[in-house]
């Protein structure tokens, strides 16, 4: 029996290496994903991974599982998650399998399932793959085993696509000095290459992709002390931090102050909308836990703002439905549909540098020019009756706008609180935003009192 830390979601699964995530389990679920692709007449699957020490072992297990159901594997190696998504589209593959636990601590790893459109599997497809894993997919005989081939050009194709979407000459003319922290994940070689192409001088720490994280890997302000000091020591124009699989980006301003992941998407929204044709209708999509700074950025350009349930697959679906120009998540995930519908840190880097270059501004000036809010996050072990909690909160905050699409979100003009079960850990998450930290903490305190 697997332990309680094994988390199975719509588009994959994650757990602690050696405790509940084992090569046998990885091979079984990979075979199920492969059988799903074969059943759709697309027996090709792209496999990629982040730099975690368990990644090579799980990649071998996954490839064996895929080959066992007759799938031909295209192995792109240690690359960013968005690079794998783009490779799925490039090769017209039936699916993609990404071995990464994203921002989770080093003892975790995970499988992320991607559909043929390069987007994480939706609920129906995810359920079909889980059913195949439970049943045990049919295996190929000696003459039907799949093949394996390498694709070493996936990162270069990804970066070339990013360059085509930004004003490379304008960025180069600014001659940015950039401080960079890639937490020894997959991002070091990729983001360094991107920045050097854009004419930046890079001062870096933790760029070696060996998966031995020197700090907590989530790029939250409290984990970026070294990067903040590096910005000050190097005189950098901006500090950049990515998570281990390079789909999330966090910023540090030129004074060495971490400014929070929500500003990543707000900066990117400004970058895209400032270059959109005047008068054209534009829509921006973000999830229910994204800061009001993103909504304000959209409003500054007259764009429609739409919120979706938390989770990249949910945001991606809303982006498609709304025909959005840009979207993403407040955790530093930028999605530009003209590239692909997936969070993409290299893209976020390029868009933000372009905005600073073209506008002739600095990160601190952009932050100072917009309304300020404070976000507070907390968590508790899962165990409470959530429906009872939700009812109690609606009664307590009877004047709040209620949204039950993903847990419970209560919103007011200048503040909100969101309570939901985590999809990646066995916990309840509480997120609140208000003009002051005290007001945001008061919202969370009320939630926790009711628990």
Image (tube, rainbow, N blue to C red):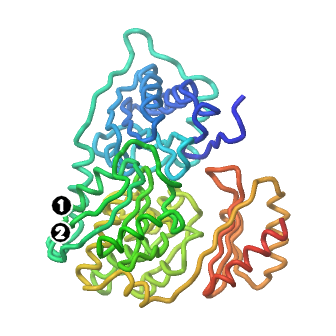
- Up the image or down, 428 lies above or below 229; here it is above
Query: What secondary structure is marked by label 2?
Result: helix
Name the residue rendered at 33%, 33% in the picture: 75
Marks 1 and 2, how far apart at CA: 8 Å
- To which quarter of the image does residue 146 belong? top left
Contact check, label 1 and label 2, Cβ < 8 Å: yes
Quadrant of the frame with the N terminus: top right
- List x then y, in percent, for residue 409: 68, 72
Query: What secondary structure is marked by label 1?
Result: helix
Q: Which residue is mark 1?
A: 197
In the image shown, does 44 or 83 lie closer to the viewer? 83
Name the residue rendered at 36%, 67% in the picture: 230
Q: Residues within 10 Å of mark 1 (few under 14, many from 20)?
A: some
- List x then y, in percent, for residue 259: 46, 76
- To which quarter of the image does residue 390 belong? bottom right
Name the residue rendered at 41%, 22% in the picture: 67
Q: Residues within 10 Å of mark 2 (few under 14, many from 20)?
A: some
Extreme residue toward the front, this view:
233
Foreground tag (1 vs 2): 1
In the image: residue 185, left or right of residue 12:
left
Q: Which residue is mark 2?
A: 168
Name the residue rendered at 32%, 83% in the picture: 362
């Amino acid at each position: 029996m697997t332990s309680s830390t094994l988390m199975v979601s719509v588009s994959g699964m994650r757990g602690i290496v050696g405790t509940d995530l084992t090569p046998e389990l990885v091979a079984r679920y990979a075979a199920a994903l492969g059988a799903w692709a074969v059943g759709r007449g697309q027996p090709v699957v792209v496999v990629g991974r982040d730099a975690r020490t368990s990644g090579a072992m799980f990649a071998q297990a996954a490839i064996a599982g895929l080959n066992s159901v007759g799938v031909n594997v295209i192995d792109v190696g240690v690359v960013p998650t968005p690079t794998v998504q783009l490779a799925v589209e490039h090769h017209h593959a039936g699916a993609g399998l990404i071995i990464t636990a994203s921002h989770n601590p080093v003892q975790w790893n995970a499988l992320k399932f991607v559909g043929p459109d390069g987007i994480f599997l939706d609920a129906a497809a995810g359920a079909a793959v889980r059913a195949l894993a439970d049943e045990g997919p049919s295996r190929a005989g000696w003459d039907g085993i799949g093949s394996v081939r390498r694709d070493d050009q996936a990162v270069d194709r990804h970066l070339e696509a990013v360059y085509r979407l930004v004003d490379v000459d304008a960025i180069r003319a600014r001659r940015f000095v950039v401080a960079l922290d890639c937490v020894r994940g997959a991002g070091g070689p990729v983001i360094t290459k991107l920045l050097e192409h854009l004419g930046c001088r890079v001062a870096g720490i933790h760029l070696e992709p060996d998966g031995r994280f020197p700090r907590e890997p989530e790029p939250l302000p409290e984990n970026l002390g070294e990067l903040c000091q590096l910005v000050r020591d190097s005189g950098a124009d901006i500090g950049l931090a990515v998570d281990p699989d390079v789909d999330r980006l966090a910023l540090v301003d030129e004074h060495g102050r971490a400014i929070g992941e929500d500003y990543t998407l707000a900066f990117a929204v400004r970058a895209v909308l400032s270059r959109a044709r005047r008068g054209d209708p534009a829509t921006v999509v973000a999830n229910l836990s994204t800061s009001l700074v993103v909504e304000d950025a959209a409003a500054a350009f007259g764009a429609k703002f739409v919120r979706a349930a938390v989770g990249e697959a949910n945001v991606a679906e809303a982006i498609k439905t709304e025909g959005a120009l840009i979207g993403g998540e407040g955790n530093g995930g930028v999605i530009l549909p003209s590239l692909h519908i997936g969070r993409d840190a290299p893209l976020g880097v390029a868009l933000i540098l372009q905005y600073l270059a073209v506008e002739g501004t600095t990160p601190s000036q952009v932050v100072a020019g917009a309304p300020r809010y404070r976000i507070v996050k907390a968590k508790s072990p899962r165990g409470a009756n959530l429906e009872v909690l939700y009812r109690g909160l609606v009664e307590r905050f009877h004047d709040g706008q209620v949204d039950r699409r993903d847990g419970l979100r209560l919103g007011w003009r200048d503040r909100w609180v969101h309570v939901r079960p985590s999809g990646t850990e066995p916990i309840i998450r509480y997120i609140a935003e208000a003009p002051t930290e005290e007001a945001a903490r008061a919202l969370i305190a009320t939630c926790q009192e009711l628990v």
